Image (tube, grey):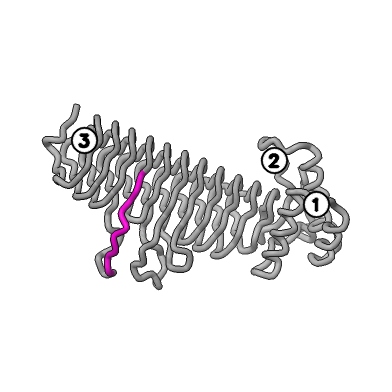
Amino acid sequence: MDFRKHAVIHAGAQLGENVEIGPFCYIDKDVVIGDGTWIGSNVTIFAGARIGKRCKIMPNSIIAGVPHNMKYKVESNTAEIDDDTWIGSNVTVFEGARIGKSCEIFPGAVIAGIPQDLKFAGEKTTAEIGDRTTIREYVTVNRGTKEAWKTVVGSDCLLMAYAHVAHDCHIGDHVILANNVTLAGHVVIEDWAILEGLVAVQQFMCIGQHSFVAGGSLVRKNVPPYVKAAREPLSYVGVNSVGLTRRKFSESQIHLIHEIYRRLYVSSYNTDQALEIIENEFSPSEERDNILNFVKRFSNDKGIMRGFRGLNGSSVNED
């Protein structure tokens, strides 16, 4: 049943076919709502918002609100939600949000809040979320600053309850952040990485593709691709063989990755020596080149995480 007669709908709003609007909603000017979208009661959609087709917005959510107390000069920055996305109850989607297709955003999440950066002065920045990403309860994804102008969460990601993604972070595709993961500003998480619960990542760190960071870890060094990382201080504890197998890496590919990291972390070589040996000993391949490029890029920029040698007399389990 359409209760739009009990809602406030601006004459300048554009509603598609078969749009249902619940009682006590407020739809502002220049809002565009696509065909077949359902909007529950007490939803507020501010000026300029773009809602795609067949979306569902549950009661008491706010779309395209201004995310500050008006102390900044306000630039038009609106919010966009693409087709087939579900927005749970009591979600806040501030201006600057760009949400892809078929996403699920659960109750209490806040998308595109202003960055927790004292230098922020109201710049027109965004928080962008790819397609088919799930954002669970009370997750916060902040907008970017003028350093990068946007915060990005890729497609097919899962951000579990209470995770925090700070300004200017860039999260790739198929990434999982478990409960209470906290990313400081400018963090990069590459495709297929998994961070277990309560992991905290320092500003400007990079976590490589297909890597796995154990719960409760503090990430203060860059984490190379394909590895497992754990302990304090954060250290290499083996190759993420289980994850790689699940993602259809062949036995020969996984063996190659093991051998490369034995040169880098298990041998007595320093980093420069290990890189030279890896380049000379192993033929070019996607896996070899990804590891080499990562280590070369970050070994002199806050460094990569340490090896397991000498930590509490323990040994690494490379399986």
In front: mark 2 or mark 3? 3
Residue that extends furthest to the left in the rendered view of this protein: 5
- Residue designated by label 3: 21
Magenta span of residues: 73-81
In front: mark 1 or mark 3? 1
Q: Is residue 10 left or right of residue 213?
A: left
- Residue designated by label 1: 284
User: In which quadrant of the rendered view does residue 303 lie?
Assistant: bottom right
Q: Earlier in the sequence, mark 2 or mark 3?
A: 3
Q: Quadrant of the C terminus?
A: top right
Amino acid type assigned to the residue bearing label 2 in the image: Leu
Residue located at (79% from left, 53% from top) = 261
In front: mark 1 or mark 2? 1
Q: Is residue 232 visible in this depiction of the protein?
A: no
Q: Earlier in the sequence, mark 1 or mark 3?
A: 3
Give the dominant element type of the magenta stretch: helix, strand or loop.
Answer: loop
Of 299 and 280, which appears nearest the observer?
280
- Distance, label 1 to label 3, CA atoms, is 58 Å
Q: Is residue 112 above or below residue 101?
A: below
Amino acid type assigned to the residue bearing label 3 in the image: Ile
Q: Secondary structure at mark 1?
A: loop
- Residue designated by label 2: 244
Decide whether residue 70 is among the magenta residues. no
Contact between labelled residues 3 and 1, with CB atoms less than 8 Å apart: no
Of 307 and 132, which appears nearest the observer?
132
Q: Earlier in the sequence, mark 1 or mark 2?
A: 2
Residue located at (86% from left, 60% from top) = 277
Of 315 and 101, which appears nearest the observer?
101
Query: How far across and how far down the image is residue 106, in percent?
Result: 38, 41
